[in-house]
Image (cartoon, helix red, strand yellow):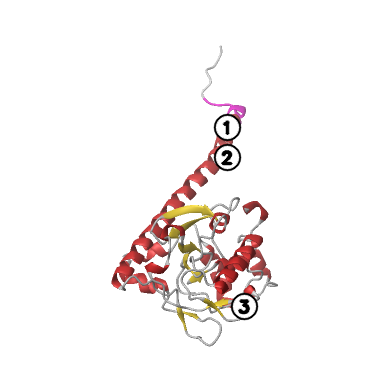
């Protein structure tokens, strides 16, 4: 007499498990991409809210933009001391969470190392994912040898809306790897890291960061794309190279000779420093 089967054989169970494993392997990248798209959308929403806050600040301060940070060393060098632009915008921001991109966890990863190797330009108290465009929101390019654009340095100065030229083609906020008040196209060409490059822990941290140092945070490492807030308030995702060519989205349309020399030099260095697959 033939008995009815009441369960699965081991082979059948293994086949089902194998099929489920294959399906999970196929779905995981799609789920990961969907989560990242969601985080990108939140980041873009943050930037738009900050754009509204800047507009409210301009209305309150006679169309004048805030300085990225407070420089306590006007005789030479920079001391990136508070208050930063973030504090100046705080009365117009309801939620401090808008200063943090949900995709950017560099601050948390690097915080132990930052505490071991503190630098003036890093605020170790709160993660900030965005920096003001230093190429536009600083004064005229002065100092150094006019024949050597690499020696020209910017000095601080307040900017008004009237000085911007086309605000829809000028960057206001840039995504940054670590908490920094400002960033310029010059930062893209950093050839060294402001920490101990021989430290094994630091070397391990660099493996999950862009090859040229602590600069723009990118959402797509294969293309080098990030979110950008423009001075007219619109937000767009662009590759870094698209902010440099065919025209600079970092610089003001000034005709000063020294400014143009420095601008040209910075753009050349920035483009040259990008990984080949980002160009």
- Which residue in the structure is indicated by mark 3? 146
Q: Which of marks 1 and 2 is in front?
A: 2
The numbered dot on residue 25 is 2
Among the two numbered marks 3 and 2 on one chain, the one whose residue lies closer to the N terminus: 2
Q: In this view, does 205 lie above or below 31?
A: below
**Label at residue 19:** 1
Q: Which of 37 and 159 is in front in this view?
A: 159
Q: How far apart are marks 1 and 3 (CA)?
A: 68 Å
Q: Which of 178 and 250 is in front in this view?
A: 250
Which percent across, then down, holds residue 50? 38, 63
Q: Earlier in the sequence, mark 1 or mark 2?
A: 1
Residue at mark 1 to residue at mark 2: CA–CA distance: 10 Å
The residue depicted at 56 percent of the width and 59 percent of the height is: 244
The residue at the point 60 percent across, 34 percent down is: 18
Question: Which x, y percent locates residue 190?
Answer: 63, 69
> Between residues 198 and 217, which one lies in front from this camera angle?
217
Element type at mark 3 = loop
The magenta segment is 7-14
Left or right relative to 115: residue 148? right
């Amino acid at each position: 007499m033939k008995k009815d089967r009441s369960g699965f054989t081991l082979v059948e169970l293994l086949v089902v498990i194998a099929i489920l494993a294959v399906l999970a392997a196929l779905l995981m990248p799609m789920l990961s991409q969907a989560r990242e798209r969601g985080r990108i959308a939140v980041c873009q929403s943050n930037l738009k809210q900050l754009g509204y806050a800047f507009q409210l600040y301009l209305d309150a301060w006679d169309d004048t933009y805030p300085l990225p940070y407070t420089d306590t060393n006007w005789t030479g060098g920079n001391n990136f001391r508070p208050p930063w632009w973030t504090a100046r915008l705080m009365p117009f921001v309801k939620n401090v969470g808008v200063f943090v991109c949900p995709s950017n966890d560099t601050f948390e990863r690097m915080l132990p190392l930052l505490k071991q190797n503190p630098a003036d330009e890093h605020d170790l108290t709160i993660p900030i994912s965005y920096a003001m465009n230093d190429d536009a929101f600083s004064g005229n390019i002065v100092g150094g040898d006019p024949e050597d654009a690499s020696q020209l340095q910017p000095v601080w100065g307040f900017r008004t809306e009237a000085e911007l030229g086309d605000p829809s083609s000028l960057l206001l906020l840039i995504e940054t790897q670590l908490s920094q008040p400002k960033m310029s196209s010059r930062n893209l060409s950093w050839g060294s890291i402001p920490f101990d490059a021989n430290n094994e822990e630091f070397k391990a941290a660099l493996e999950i960061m862009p090859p040229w140092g602590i600069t723009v945070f990118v959402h797509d490492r294969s293309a080098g794309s990030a979110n950008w807030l423009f001075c007219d308030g619109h937000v767009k995702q662009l590759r870094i190279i698209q902010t440099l060519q065919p025209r600079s989205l970092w610089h003001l349309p000034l005709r000063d000779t020294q400014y143009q020399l420095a601008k040209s030099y910075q753009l050349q260095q920035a483009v040259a420093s990008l990984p080949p697959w980002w160009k």
